[in-house]
Amino acid sequence: MKRRYLDYSATTPVKKEVLEAMIPYFTETFGNASSIHTFGQIAKEVLTESRKKVANLINANENEIFFTSGGTESDNWALKSIAKVNKNRGKHIITSKIEHHAILHSCETLESEGFEVTYLDVDEYGFISLEDLKNAIRKDTILISIMYINNEIGTVQNIEEIGKIAKDNNVIFHTDAVQAAGNIKIDVKELNVDLLSMSSHKIYGPKGIGALYIKRGTRIIPFMDGGAQEKKKRAGTENIPAIVGFAKACEIAKENLDEHINKLSVLRDDLIEKVSNSIDDVKVNGPRDNRHPGNVNFAFKYIEGEALLLMLDAVGVAASSGSACTAGSLEPSHVLMSIGLGHEIAHGSLRLTIGDFTEEEDIDFIVENLIRIVQTLRDMSPLYQG
Amino acid sequence: MLYTDIVMDHFSNPRNVGEIKDADGMGEVGNIQCGDIMRIYINVVDDVITECKFKTFGCGSAIASSSITTELVKGKTIDEALELTNKDVVQQLGGLPSVKVHCSVLAEDALKVAIYDYAEKNNKNYKGLEGFDPNQVNHEH
């Protein structure tokens, strides 16, 4: 059976060119970048080159890029360190209700340490209101953290305007750009962003590596104590093969960005249109415009998401859902609840995320099978009056 | 894999899906918040369950639990059917992940509520229903 992967927002396969770039750094050029000898110095050189490539994807300066173990670490580091450094200035943080758990749970930790957090509501498409943001800012607000692109429903926030508001009010601004970097043009010089989290495995690089962009002049303290790596900001021997892979993935993403966005958005719009036209009682979650180029999210009435995923998997289609059953919790996804979906429809959500290896033929296959599977499950459902 | 082959078989090829029009007994449990609603219908002749069907809104294990329950009680007497517990359902399915065990509880409860409905309508008393209150069925996970 041909397996079709439609879960690129969960993770992506490593591209061949990326893997090939990494391989020599496991076996031949394996030195520790802190060592004085040639092995070490070669590693140090490649570290610098890699940092430039990662910086280039978001138009940052190379000395503003700090490698971490991934998006979660970058988010934790940004929030907790900025809070700690600025605690004498204030104790108030602003974020949104639809952030990734790396942000939300970091905020909860900070709340338990005495910080106050405002969680901004979002509208039915997942956008925060800039007015709400302005109104939420207090004299003691030290940090705003708003995700660039939502991982479930693909909403692209107006980061530039949020950045302006933060700057006008002298508040530090962090954005979780894990779903954005490589899927949208990012220029930190135009954005008024102080900190930005990135992850490698969402853009065809290896897992376990990411970065935090820290704008020059932003005061931050280390999250990890130890050696003097990453300008004494993030200790631990650099994971050179992963960094090389991440850098290669950034380089490819930068080169092909327009083509990537065009290809994905055509497939995305096609999938949304075909499913909307051929299945009744389906809602498209997330916005029409300002949407992640590869994100599709439906809610099918009368059926439950996990059952849908299992039936799709049985025909080789890999997808995800915001249903409570898939999360092992009692509540459907916080994102779907925040955009105002009722329980009955949030349980029937399906996320299909398109990537560089998705083909038109996959879309047709999915539509055909979705029509059948949704009907099969509806015929079993006591909520459906066919 | 998340589920055993038996669960996947009952999920992919569910037995006895559907409604019984004017069923002798019907039981519905679960709630929309948790994402599971299970409805079981029974027809009874001479205290024997001659027909049993289900309709379920829920995950793979909820559908499989409903399906196997209908199979297990078809042809059984009411007293025998009332002895069925969620543990039997889990065992017959070859096991369920711990977070999904509540699905088997829903199946046991839906069946009991259906039998209670039948007993009420027909003024019957069954030992297995002593102390059973359909309104006290735990609808939370």
Image (tube, coloured by chain):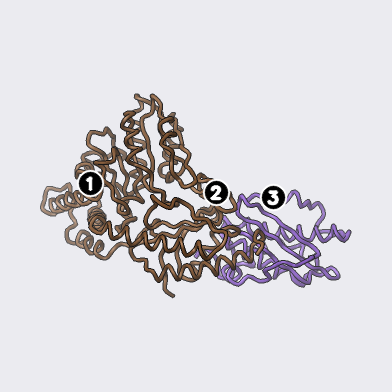
Q: Is residue A10 visible?
A: no
**Could you tell me which secondary element the residue under label 1 belongs to?**
loop
Q: CA distance from mark 3 to mark 1?
A: 57 Å
Residue that lies at the very extreme toward the right in this rendered image:
B123
Residue B48: x, y in percent? 81, 70
Q: Give residue A229's position: percent from left, percent from top.
A: 22, 43
Instruction: Name the subunit of mark 1.
Output: A
Quarter assignment of residue A365: bottom left
Label 2 element class: loop
Residue B5, x across and y down, in percent: 55, 70
Q: Which mark is residue A59?
A: 1
What chain is colored brown? A
Which corner quadrant of the image does residue A13 belong to?
bottom left
- Which is nearer the N-term, disc 1 or disc 2? 1
Residue type at mark 1 is: Asn
Taking depth in this image into account, of A50 and A152 the one nearest to the observer is A152
Task: State the residue position of label 3.
Answer: B138
What chain does mark 2 sit on? A
Horizontal placement of B109 versus A239: left or right?
right
Q: Where on the picture, by quarter, is residue A386?
A: bottom right
Relative to A225, is B48 above or below? below
Q: Which chain is purple?
A: B
3 or 1: mark nearer the eye: 1
Pointer 2: residues within 10 angstroms few (<14), some, or many (20+)?
Answer: some
Residue that numbered label 2 is attached to: A341
Residue at screen point 26% across, 57% down:
A253
- Number of numbered markers: 3
